[in-house]
Amino acid sequence: MIVRILHEGQYDISGQTLDQVNRLDATLLEHLRASDQAGFDQTLAQLLATVRKEGKRLSDHELRESHLILPAADFTLDEAKGLFHP
């Protein structure tokens, strides 16, 4: 599965890594609902680190359709609230 991190690039991740990403995404949503800035920041950092560590980075010249798009590392809780209505 191809995952894009905005402003960074694309990664090819395994199904096992996708399971980890989905769990972290659910936790991120919980922090969003609770307006927990610290938890949101920590979980987002962990989510992006998981994709970077476990995924294979694709060349910038190799553009493929992304199945999942993750925000950039500096994405804020307020920006997330503006996009999502949990």
Image: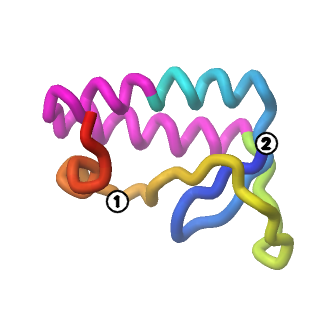
In the rendered view, does 37 fall on the left or right side of 5? Answer: left
State whether residue 64 is above or below residue 23.
Answer: below
In the rendered view, does 19 fall on the left or right side of 5? Answer: right
Q: Nearer the viewer, residue 24 or 65?
A: 65
Q: Earlier in the sequence, mark 1 or mark 2?
A: 2
Mark linked to residue 39 = none
- The N terminus lies in quadrant: top right
**Residue 10 covered by magenta stretch:** no
Q: How many marks?
A: 2
* Rendering coords of residue 47 (x, y %): 50, 37
* Rendering coords of residue 29 (x, y %): 34, 30
State whether residue 48 is above or below residue 50.
Answer: below
Mark linked to residue 1 = 2
Q: Magenta segment, which residues?
A: 26-54
Q: Amino acid at mark 2?
A: Met
Residue shown at 63%/47% (left/top)? 68
